[in-house]
Amino acid sequence: MPLLVFATITARPGAEADLKNASRELVTDVRTEAACQLYELYESTEHPERFIMHELWDDEAGLQAHSQMPHMTAFGAKAKEWLAKPAELTKVTV
């Protein structure tokens, strides 16, 4: 069953541009994953420190495999210094 995910990502003050640029680069890699149907990055107009990743996966297993991909672990290591808090995920079955 397809799984829709909204990931709310909040940057630390002053780290917005770094997080946004790295996230944009990440999108290209994630879109090549077999289980990825959609992966889009949005920036809040009301809260410039907040980004939303709109994702659609084949299923929960595809999302779990995504979190283990080399590009995700590399991004996670870099993003630690830019994130105000862990990403907040909202999962919705389609």
Image (cartoon, rainbow, N blue to C red):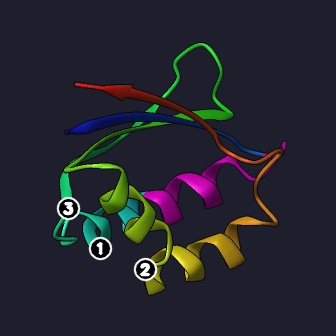
| Element under disc 3 | loop
Magenta-drawn stretch contains 74: no
Labelled pair 2, 1 in contact (Cβ < 8 Å): yes
Q: In this picture, is 15 found above or below 7?
A: below
Instruction: Report the Cα–Cα distance between label 2 and label 1.
Output: 10 Å
The dominant secondary structure in magenta is helix
Residue 29 rendering spot, x and y as whole percentages: 29, 73
Give the answer, above or below, for where 47 lies relative to 20.
above
Q: Which residue is mark 2?
A: 69
Circle nearer the N terminus (3, 2): 3
**First in residue order: circle 2 vs circle 1:** 1
Measured in 3D between alpha carbons, the distance from the residue under mark 3 to the one under mark 2, in whole angstroms, is: 12 Å
Q: Which residues are magenta?
A: 12-23
Quadrant of the drawing holding the C terminus: top left
Residue type at mark 1 is: Asp
Within 10 Å of disc 1 (Cα), the crowding (few <14, some 14-19, many 20+) is: some
Dot 3, how many residues are within 10 Å of its Cα: few (below 14), some (14-19), or many (20+)? many
Q: Residue at x 30, y 61 (%)?
A: 62
Q: Residue at image x 69%, y 75%?
A: 78
Q: Name the spot of residue 88 as percent of width and height, x first.
A: 65, 36
Residue plotted at (82% across, 66% down): 81
Write down the residue under mark 3.
35
Q: Position of residue 92 (x, y in %)?
A: 38, 25
Looking at the rendered structure, the kind of residue marked 3 is Ala
Which comes before the other along the chain, label 3 or label 1?
1
**Of the residues tagged 3 and 1, which is closer to the observer?**
3
Q: Is 91 on the left-hand or right-hand side of 4?
A: right
Secondary structure at badge 2 equals loop
Mark 1, residue position: 29
Within the image, what quadrant is residue 51 found in?
top right
The residues tagged by marks 3 and 1 sit, at their Cα atoms, a distance apart of 13 Å
Specify whether residue 15 is painted magenta: yes
